[in-house]
Image: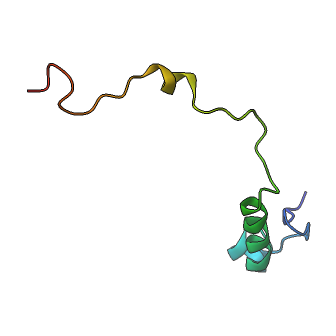
Amino acid sequence: MSARCPSCNKVLTDAMREARPFCSARCRQIDLGRWLNDEYRISGTEQEGTEAEADVPMVRKGDREDDD
């Protein structure tokens, strides 16, 4: 099984090793542009914050009684 460029699906050769996993710098830039334009998304639901973050109160230095 040979590796393929995730952008253009071209079979990668040893000469293309500097741009891996892409076949060229151009394909790398195309992929970055797709991420920046929200063409790719990580599945899941959007949330304001995680439950762990919501349960932790904000405490600044000097606000706690034991900070002397």
Query: What x and y, as percent, mark residue 12?
Result: 84, 71
Work out whether 50 lies above or below 35: above
**Where on the picture, by quarter, is residue 46?**
top right
Q: Which residue is drawn at 91% across and 71% down?
A: 10
Which color scheme is applied? rainbow
- As drawn, the residue found furthest toward the left would be 68
| Residue 21 appears in the picture as rendered | no
Quadrant in the picture for the N terminus = bottom right
At 75% from the left and 68% from the top, the residue drawn is 33
Location of residue 25 (image quadrant): bottom right
**Residue 21 at what x, y percent from top left?**
75, 64
Q: Residue at x 74, y 59 (%)?
A: 35
Which residue appears at 78% of the width and 48% of the height? 41
Q: Can residue 25 be seen in this view?
A: yes
| Front one among 59 and 14 | 59
Residue in the foreground of this view, choosing between 64 and 31: 64
Question: Residue 20's image quarter?
Answer: bottom right
Q: Answer above or below: position of 30 versus 64.
A: below
Q: Report the number of numbered marks.
A: 0
Q: With 57 as the anchor, is 22 left or right in this view?
A: right
Q: Position of residue 28 (x, y in %)?
A: 74, 71
Closer to the camera in the image, 7 or 53:
53
Q: Specify the quadrant that holds the C terminus.
A: top left
Left or right, 50 with reference to 65? right
